[in-house]
């Protein structure tokens, strides 16, 4: 089984698909953390207004997700979303 997984990384198409999936998972996780930071900034009063993540903060998550998906050990510390 380990050999099968190791062999998957030798095929360029499968390697690209695995990298893309990793990037999407990292982006999903970072987006969730960004919205949680927005809720925290509102002092958890979501009954009064909807939390908002700025467009620039969203755009900043994309390269960060790419970097995190390309790292093999640990994760890159994220900055607080604005």
Image (cartoon, helix red, strand yellow):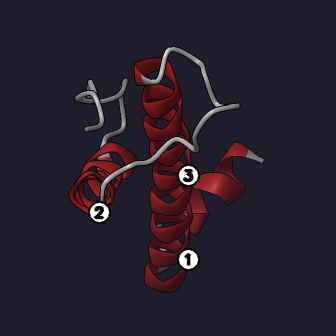
Which is closer to the viewer, label 3 or label 2? Answer: 2
Which is closer to the viewer, label 1 or label 2? Answer: 2
Residue 61 spot, x, y in % from top left? 31, 52
Determine whether the residue tagged by mark 1 lies in a helix, strand or loop.
Answer: helix
Tag 3 residue: 28
Tag 1 residue: 14
Could you tell me which residue is drawn at 31 percent across and 57 percent down? Answer: 66
Residue contact between numbered discs 3 and 2, judged by CB atoms under 8 Å: no
Could you tell me which residue is drawn at 31 percent across and 41 percent down? Answer: 71
Q: Residues within 10 Å of mark 2 (few under 14, many from 20)?
A: few
- Say left or right for 21 vs 77: right
69 relative to 37, above or below: below
Compare marks 1 and 3 and give the one earlier in the sequence.
1
Could you tell me which residue is drawn at 43 percent across and 38 percent down? Answer: 34
Residue 3 spot, x, y in % from top left? 66, 51
Tag 2 residue: 55
Task: For marks 1 and 2, give the CA distance.
Answer: 32 Å
């Amino acid at each position: 089984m380990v050999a099968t997984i190791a062999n998957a990384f030798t095929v360029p198409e499968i390697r690209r698909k695995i990298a893309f999936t990793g990037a999407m998972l990292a982006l999903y996780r970072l987006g969730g953390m960004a919205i949680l930071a927005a809720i925290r900034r509102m002092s958890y009063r979501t009954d009064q207004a909807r939390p908002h993540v700025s467009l620039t903060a969203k755009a900043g998550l994309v390269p960060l997700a790419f970097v995190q998906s390309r790292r093999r050990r640990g994760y890159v510390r994220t900055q607080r979303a604005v």
